[in-house]
Image (cartoon, rainbow, N blue to C red):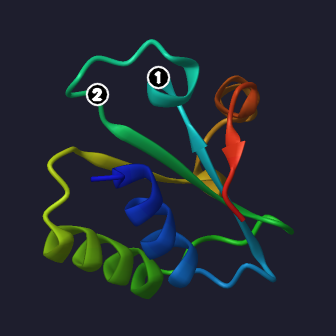
Amino acid sequence: MNWDGKIKDIVVKNVDTDFFDVYFFGSRVGGTNSKWSDYDVAVVGKKGQKLSSLARFKIEEELERLKVPYKVDLVDFSRVSDDFKKFALKEAIKWS
């Protein structure tokens, strides 16, 4: 199963892409992942907005229902350091 596509669809569907960008980043993008590596997904407010608790809940609920066999680390970039943002987005793939 194409988990990348399924995860992307769920996240993008549950955020307002007029206000947020969604990125896939981390070891799975960089090619350094193991079979069981997690999926790292960034939600970036175009004007620094925070991801709402409701949107996060909906995303996590749908991922759980889908029974994704990997941990999905959903990162709200309004809550991380600038250094982490630069590092994470270096090789990221923009999903929306």
> Toward the viewer: 4 or 48?
4
Name the side, left or right, on which 9 lies relative to 45: left
Determine the residue positioned at 49% across, 72% down: 9
Could you tell whether 82 is left or right of 1 in the image?
right
The residue where tag 2 is placed is: 37
Furthest residue in direction top, as rendered: 32
Question: Which one is in front, 77 or 39?
Answer: 39
Displayed quadrant of residue 40: top left
Whether the residues at callouts 1 and 2 have beta carbons within 8 Å, the answer is: yes
Q: How many marks?
A: 2
x, y percent for residue 80: 60, 43
> Where does the image place residue 11, in percent across and percent down from the top left?
49, 70
- Name the residue: 41% across, 74% down: 56
- N-terminal label among 1 and 2: 1
Q: Which dot marks residue 27?
A: 1
Q: Name the residue furthest front.
A: 1
10 is higher (above) or lower (below) than 33: below
Residue shown at the point (26%, 68%) measured from the top left:
63
Label 1 SS: helix
| Residue 37 percent location from the top left of the image | 28, 28
